[in-house]
C-alpha cells in the first residue's frame, strides 16, 4: 500500500481511518480516471454511518476499499490503527443484489463466511441456526434461494454477514432492490438489532441513495460528490431513536441533507474543474487550429428533455419556484433521478437551484411559454456552449459527407470517462442534439449526420 499521509493526528479509538484515499481506474487506452479523490475519514465505534452520493460517484468503490476487497491507488486505510492488507476479516458486506449462491441452501449460504474462517462444522451449524433465527428465517434452513422472496433472500444476506460477528458491517444499498414494505420491515428490524446491541457489530457503514433512509437509520451522514468523489458534507444526525418520519425535526433534517445533496454542485462549479481529471488527449482533437481554446469535455447531466419540460411547466404553474424535496416526493423521484433533470435545467440556464429550491429563470419562462419550435431554438442556442456539442458539430460540419459513425465519438469520450459513463454521455448528447435539430441519428447504421438544412 502507498505512503502514509500526515494530514491528521491519528486517533487511537478509530475503527477505520482513511488517509488521502484516491482511486484511479485505468481505461483501455491507458488514461486514468480518478474516481475517488483524497478521501479522509474516521469511523468510530458506535457509529451508524450513511454514505450518500450520486450513482456512479464511487460509493461501492469506497466500500470495497474499506473492506479490503480493493486497494486504493494512493493513500492508506487503517483498521484499528494498522494498515489493512487483503480482505479485512473484521468486516462483512451486505450487497444490494443479495449475492447468494443458488446451489447452496439458506443454512449453507449463512455458513459460508465461517467456512472461510476455518470454524469447525458443528460450531458453524449452531451459529448459522442462531443467526437464521435472529433474522426471522427459522424453518427455511434447507430452502434454496430461488424458493425465497427478495426480502427473505436479503435476510439471508444479513445473516451471512452477521455470522462472522463483524466489527464493521458494510451494506451497499441493501434495501434498494426490495419492495417498499419489505424494505421498511427489514430496516427497522436491523435498526433494532443494532440499537439493542443484539449483534456484536461495532460500526455500520451503509451506502444509500435514499436521503430519508439515511436520516431514518444513521447517526452520521456523509455526502460524496461525483467526478471525482470527495467528501462534501459530514454531519451528525442527533434525532433520537425510534425516529418518526412525520416529525417536524425529521422533515427538517431530510430537508437539510437534501439541500446539501442538491447544492454541492453550485459551489463546486466555481472552483475551476481541475484539468488533470479530464485531461484532453491531444491526439483525438489534433485537427483543431492551435489558437482555438482547447475544449474540456465536462460531463453533461443525463436529463431527458421531456422530463425537463414537464418539470419546468409544473414549477411555472406554482409561481416559478418550488422546493425540490417536495417535488421529488410528489413525483416519486429519488434525488438521484431528479438531480440530472435540474442540472440540465441549470446547464441550459432555464432554472437555478438554490438552497434546495428550484427557481425558473427568465429564459426558462420563455421556454415554458413557447411552442415546440421556440423550445428547440432555445436548446439549440444553449448547446452551442457545451463542449461535447462543439466537438460533434465541428466533426459533422468539417466532414465532406457530413456524417460520422457513433463509434468515433464513443472512442473520444472513452478517453475522458469510463466506458459506461462515455456511453451514457453520448446517448444523452444524441438525444439532446436530435431534439434541438442540430443533427440526425440513424439507429440502424449508428451514424450521426446533418441534412441539407443543417449544413448551412
Ligand atoms: P457507485 O457505487 O457510487 O454508483 P461505483 O463505485 O460503482 O459507483 O463506480 C464509480 C465509477 O467507477 C463509475 O464511473 C464506474 O464506471 C467506475 N468503475 C467502477 N469499478 C470499475 C472498474 N473495476 N474498472 C473501471 N472503472 C470502474
Ligand atoms: Mg454502487
Image (cartoon, helix red, strand yellow):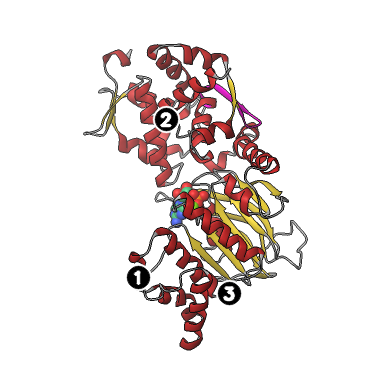
User: Helix, strand, or loop for circle 2?
Assistant: loop
The residue where tag 2 is placed is 304
User: Does the beta carbon of the residue at mark 2 sit less than 8 Å from ligand 1?
Assistant: no
- Where disc 3 sits, the SS reads loop
Which of the two discs, 2 and 3, sits closer to the camera?
Answer: 3
Asked if the residue under mark 1 is in contact with the one under mark 2, i.e. CB atoms within 8 Å, the reply is no
Residue located 60% across and 52% down the image:
51
Q: Nearer the viewer, mark 2 or mark 1?
A: 1
Which of the pair 388/158 is nearer the observer?
158
Residue range corresponding to the magenta coloring: 347-357
Does residue 198 appear anywhere in the picture? yes
The structure residue drawn at horizontal position 41% and vertical position 43%, both measured from the top left corner, is: 414
Counting from the top left corner in percent of width and height, residue 401 is at 25, 23
Q: How far apart are marks 2 and 1 (CA)?
A: 41 Å
The answer to whether residue 299 is left or right of residue 188 is: left
The location of residue 275, given as percent across then percent down, is 57, 38
The residue that mark 3 highlights is 165
Q: Earlier in the sequence, mark 1 or mark 3?
A: 1
Residue at the image point whose x is 70% and y is 50% from the top: 237
- Look at the numbered disc 3 and say if its residue's Cβ is closer than 8 Å to ligand 2: no
Q: Which of marks 2 and 1 is nearer the N terminus?
A: 1
On the image, the x and y values in percent for residue 338 come to 51, 35
Tell me the residue that label 1 is attached to.
Answer: 144
- In the image, residue 149 above or below residue 428: below
Amino acid at each position: 500500500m502507498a505512503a502514509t499521509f500526515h494530514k491528521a493526528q491519528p486517533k487511537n479509538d478509530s475503527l477505520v481511518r482513511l488517509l488521502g484515499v484516491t482511486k484511479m481506474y485505468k481505461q483501455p487506452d491507458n488514461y486514468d480516471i480518478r474516481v475517488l479523490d483524497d478521501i479522509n475519514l474516521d469511523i468510530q465505534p458506535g457509529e451508524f454511518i450513511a454514505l450518500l452520493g450520486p450513482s456512479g460517484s464511487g460509493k461501492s468503490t469506497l466500500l470495497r476499499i474499506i473492506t479490503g476487497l480493493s486497494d486504493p491507488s494512493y493513500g492508506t486505510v487503517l483498521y484499528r490503527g494498522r494498515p489493512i492488507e487483503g480482505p479485512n476479516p473484521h468486516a462483512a458486506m451486505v450487497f444490494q443484489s443479495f449475492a447468494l449462491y443458488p446451489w447452496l441452501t439458506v443454512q449453507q449460504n449463512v455458513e459460508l463466511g465461517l467456512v472461510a474462517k476455518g470454524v469447525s462444522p458443528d460450531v458453524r451449524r449452531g451459529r448459522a441456526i442462531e443467526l437464521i433465527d435472529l433474522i426471522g428465517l427459522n424453518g427455511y434452513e434447507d430452502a434454496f434461494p430461488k424458493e425465497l422472496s427478495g426480502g427473505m433472500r436479503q435476510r439471508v444476506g444479513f445473516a451471512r454477514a452477521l455470522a462472522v460477528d463483524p466489527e464493521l458491517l458494510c451494506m451497499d444499498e441493501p434495501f434498494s432492490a426490495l419492495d417498499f414494505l419489505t424494505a421498511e420491515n427489514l430496516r427497522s428490524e436491523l435498526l433494532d438489532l443494532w440499537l439493542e446491541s443484539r449483534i456484536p457489530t461495532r460500526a455500520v457503514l451503509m451506502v444509500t441513495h435514499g436521503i430519508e433512509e439515511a436520516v431514518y437509520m444513521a447517526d452520521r451522514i456523509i455526502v460524496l460528490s461525483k467526478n471525482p468523489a470527495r467528501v462534501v458534507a459530514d454531519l451528525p444526525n442527533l434525532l433520537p431513536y425510534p425516529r418518526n418520519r412525520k416529525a417536524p425535526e425529521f422533515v427538517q433534517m431530510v430537508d437539510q441533507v437534501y439541500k446539501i445533496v442538491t447544492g454541492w454542485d453550485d459551489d463546486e462549479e466555481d472552483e475551476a474543474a481541475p484539468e488533470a481529471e479530464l485531461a484532453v488527449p491531444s491526439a483525438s482533437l489534433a485537427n483543431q487550429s492551435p489558437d482555438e481554446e482547447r475544449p474540456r469535455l465536462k460531463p453533461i447531466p443525463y436529463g431527458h428533455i421531456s422530463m425537463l419540460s414537464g418539470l419546468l411547466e409544473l414549477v411555472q404553474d406554482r409561481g416559478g419556484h418550488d422546493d425540490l424535496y417536495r417535488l421529488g416526493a410528489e413525483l416519486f423521484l429519488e434525488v438521484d433521478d431528479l438531480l440530472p433533470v435540474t442540472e440540465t435545467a441549470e446547464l441550459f440556464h432555464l432554472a437555478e437551484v438554490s438552497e434546495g429550491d428550484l427557481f425558473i429563470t427568465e429564459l426558462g419562462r420563455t421556454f415554458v411559454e413557447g411552442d415546440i419550435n421556440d423550445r428547440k431554438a432555445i436548446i439549440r442556442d444553449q448547446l452551442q456552449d457545451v463542449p461535447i456539442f462543439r466537438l460533434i458539430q465541428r466533426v459533422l460540419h468539417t466532414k465532406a459527407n457530413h456524417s460520422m459513425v457513433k463509434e468515433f465519438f464513443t472512442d473520444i469520450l472513452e478517453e475522458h470517462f469510463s466506458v459506461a459513463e462515455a456511453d451514457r454521455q453520448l446517448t444523452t448528447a444524441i438525444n439532446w442534439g436530435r431534439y434541438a435539430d442540430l443533427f440526425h441519428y440513424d439507429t440502424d447504421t449508428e451514424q450521426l449526420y446533418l441534412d441539407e438544412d443543417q449544413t448551412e
